[in-house]
Amino acid sequence: MSVKPIDFHLTYANTVRESRDKQNDFHRHKDINHYNENKLEAEVNKNLQKTKNTEEAQHKAINQRNKEEKSKGRQQEKKRKRQKSEIKKQLDKDSGIGQKLDIMI
């Protein structure tokens, strides 16, 4: 049977803690690299989302402009049709004048 020192449980806990600290120090650079890589990847994804959002906003703005232009074109077309129909109505009213010549001698 071996003789253990009185403070064996204290020294054992200290050695376990020290070995854990040493191992953490050994792996710390890997953790830091992993953290930096994830941070970089998240930033890249965020920037990609920004570009997508701006492109979508530009497409929406272009579509909105196109809709406005189309609606203006439709309104102008309706106005032209109304003017043409008014002119035709006016001509139909005045159709009797100038078609026949009544000459009395």
Image (spheres, grey):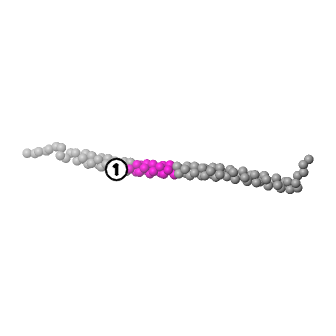
Give residue 76's position: percent from left, percent from top: 34, 50
User: Camera-side residue: 68 or 98?
Assistant: 68
Q: Main secondary structure of the magenta part?
A: helix
| Picture residue at 82% right of the left edge, 55% below the top | 11
Judge left or right: residue 94 versus residue 74.
left
| Picture residue at 88% right of the left edge, 55% below the top | 6
> Which three-letter amino acid code belongs to the residue tagged 1?
Gln
- Does the magenta portion include 75? no
| Picture residue at 48% right of the left edge, 49% below the top | 56
- Does the magenta portion include 51? yes
Q: Is residue 99 above or below residue 6?
A: above
SS assignment at label 1: helix
Residue range of the region highlighted in magenta in the rendering: 50-69
Give the residue at the far front of this rendering.
Answer: 2
Give the residue at the far top of this rendering.
Answer: 100
The C terminus sits in image quarter? top left
Q: Which residue is mark 1?
A: 76
Give residue 89's position: percent from left, percent from top: 27, 47
User: Camera-side residue: 59 or 24?
Assistant: 24
Give residue 3's position: percent from left, percent from top: 90, 51
